[in-house]
Image (tube, rainbow, N blue to C red):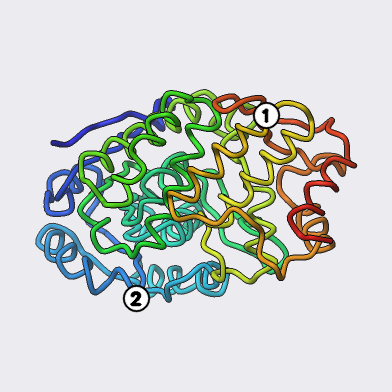
Amino acid sequence: MMKTLQVSLGERSYPIYIGADLLSQGHLLAQHIQNNEVCIVTNTTVAPLYLESLVSLLSNDFHCETVVLADGEQYKNLLELNQIFDQLLTSRFSRQVTLIALGGGVIGDMTGFAAACYQRGVPFIQIPTTLLSQVDSSVGGKTAVNHALGKNMIGAFYQPQCVIADTNTLNTLDDRQLSSGLAEVIKYGLINDIDFFEWLEINMAGLRAREPHLLAEAIERSCQDKADIVAKDEREQGLRALLNLGHTFGHAIETGMGYGEVLHGEAIAIGMMMAADLSQRLGWLMAEDVDRMSRLFIIAGLPVTAPAEMTLTQFMSLMAVDKKVQNGVIRLVLLKSIGHAVMCDDYELSKLADTLTSFTGQ
């Protein structure tokens, strides 16, 4: 049974479709393609699984071209992005072309950014094929590529025409990728939905076992939480920043270790534990709250300690170029309690140093 949610952004509003076997429903996709020009962007892992059938579905009604990029966070850069522009220009596609992102978060981010830039903006559609992209990166219009000095530092806010989350695609994920997506699912419970967090504590084993009804519910609740926040704060001026819980620490890990070495969800899980540690040092969380979070991450198959290679100096240097730095101050999302996140820039720097020291052993 398909569920439809709405991201309410006035004239930029769009639906999120969640359900099984949605990739075979051509009418669902076609209604959001405004002209006869289509360019599908995917990667070398996803292409053999879904690209041929998607092209067959569209080719009778649309002029359809494809771009197959290398797979991995390490390829999320301006050089690889140029391959999309090369195909669009070689095909002489107009401003009416619709780009389709078929893949995980990297493909979604790169395709969305290409759509925002090509001829100053063309429509695009998100077809996320990983749990992480279905519950987080495909929704909300954040698009970007990485730079050697910082993750997602070059990008744009640019909303898709729709998001089509086919839960059947999760059957092809390996366990590590599934766990990576569960980190972002847990995040929603931590920032503003204690009931969801408690539901996850009860159902995490079933989610890791890929029980379809549990995965569908987790995706729906995550997307609804994010859609509600994005509708109130599209460009991250306030409330939406809470979705970055753990991300300042986590992005430092991803950049410092080399893109792709630590999966995004793994880095964010560690980052959320670091945020919890600092929140406890500030007197907001109890030790049992931090332990409760740690248990859930471990059951989800996620790490809770920083890589041994990461140094205190690396953390401080990389966190200093995070997008949330304002006037030289690192603004962090911290937890007043499980289910209540806050943006904070007046914490004691000595407490942050204590957290970093604890996680790096330095």
User: As drawn, is 270 to the left or to the right of 98?
Assistant: right
Q: Amino acid at mark 1?
A: Met
Q: Amino acid at mark 2?
A: Thr
Please tell me which of labels 1 and 2 falls first in the chain: 2
SS assignment at label 2: loop
Q: Nearer the viewer, residue 164 or 130?
A: 130
User: As drawn, is 282 to the left or to the right of 137?
Assistant: right
Q: In the image, is residue 69 above or below residue 33? A: below
**Which mark is on residue 201?**
none
Q: In the image, is residue 243 above or below residue 336? A: below
The percent coordinates of residue 286 (x first, y second) are 67, 29
The percent coordinates of residue 185 (x first, y second) are 43, 41
In the rendered image, the quadrant that contains the N terminus is top left
Q: Nearer the viewer, residue 99 or 2?
A: 2
**Between tags 1 and 2, which lies in front?**
1
Q: Nearer the viewer, residue 117 or 204?
A: 204
SS assignment at label 1: loop
In the rendered image, the quadrant that contains the C terminus is bottom right
**Which mark is on residue 44?**
2
Residue at point 52%, 25% (across, down) = 192
- The 10 Å Cα crowd at callout 1, few under 14, some 14 to 19, many 20 or more, is some
The percent coordinates of residue 38 (x first, y second) are 27, 60
User: As drawn, is 79 to the left or to the right of 301?
Assistant: right
Q: In the image, is residue 334 above or below residue 10? A: below
Q: Are marks 1 and 2 in contact (CB under 8 Å)?
A: no
Q: Which residue is mark 1?
A: 286
In space, the residues marked 1 and 2 are separated at their CA atoms by 45 Å
- The 10 Å Cα crowd at callout 2, few under 14, some 14 to 19, many 20 or more, is some
Residue at point 32%, 44% (across, down) = 163
Residue at point 71%, 41% (across, down) = 277
